Image (cartoon, rainbow, N blue to C red):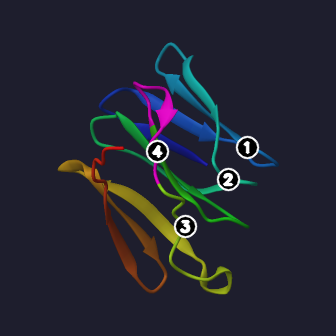
Amino acid sequence: MVCTSTSKNLIAASEYGLQPECHIYQMPQKQIIAQFEMQTTLRSIGMSFSRDGKYLLLIGGVPDFTISIYDIEAQAFFKTPLTKLPFKHSQLRCDGVQFNPRCSEEFCILSDTKIYFYTIKQAFM
């Protein structure tokens, strides 16, 4: 899976296989600016950069279907409760993921029958 950020000239590419990694490249130099193990077992089925290029949204595939967000500047995943896609494996068809172009704290996931909206809220421990 591949996605791009035109605002920061970034390309993200995810691997397929056990414990896959994601690589984020700064273009046109083709320099790796981030490399990390994804929070999924086999592969991602959806990826999207926020409009400002600060965050990368990753949707894990079979068997876990996790939703995770990577902060590119902090070089770390957001600390969130374990979040999975809200539909069963047999119903799964993720047609796309996208951040709200006006706000990097909102995103949606499109399945073949529904669209799911999410808002990222800051919490304190």
Query: Who's the residue at 60% across and 79% down the image?
Result: 92
The three-letter code of the residue at mark 3 reads Lys
**Secondary structure found at label 3:** loop
Label whose residue precedes the other's in the sequence (1 or 4): 1
Disc 3 designates what residue?
84
For the residues marked 1 and 4, what is the alpha-carbon distance in whole angstroms?
A: 20 Å
* Label 4 close to label 2 by CB (< 8 Å): no
Lateral position of residue 76 relative to residue 18, left or right:
left
Q: In the image, which disc is placed on residue 40? A: 2
Label whose residue precedes the other's in the sequence (4 or 2): 2
How crowded is the residue under tag 2: few (<14 C-alpha within 10 Å), some, or many (20+)?
A: many
* Label 1 close to label 4 by CB (< 8 Å): no
Label whose residue precedes the other's in the sequence (1 or 3): 1
Label whose residue precedes the other's in the sequence (2 or 1): 1
Q: Is residue 76 magenta?
A: yes
The three-letter code of the residue at mark 2 reads Thr
Q: In the image, which disc is placed on residue 20? A: 1
Q: Is residue 43 magenta?
A: no
Query: Who's the residue at 36% across and 44% down the image?
Result: 125
Mark 4 or mark 2, whichever is nearer to me: 4
Label whose residue precedes the other's in the sequence (2 or 3): 2
| Image position of 37 with respect to 32: above or below | below
For the residues marked 1 and 3, what is the alpha-carbon distance in whole angstroms?
A: 18 Å
* Label 1 close to label 3 by CB (< 8 Å): no
How crowded is the residue under tag 3: few (<14 C-alpha within 10 Å), some, or many (20+)?
A: few
Give residue 41's position: percent from left, percent from top.
74, 54
The magenta segment is 71-80
How crowded is the residue under tag 1: few (<14 C-alpha within 10 Å), some, or many (20+)?
A: some
Query: Who's the residue at 35% across and 33% down the image?
Result: 54
Lateral position of residue 58 relative to residue 55, left or right:
right
Q: Among all residues in the image, which is located at the extreme front?
A: 125
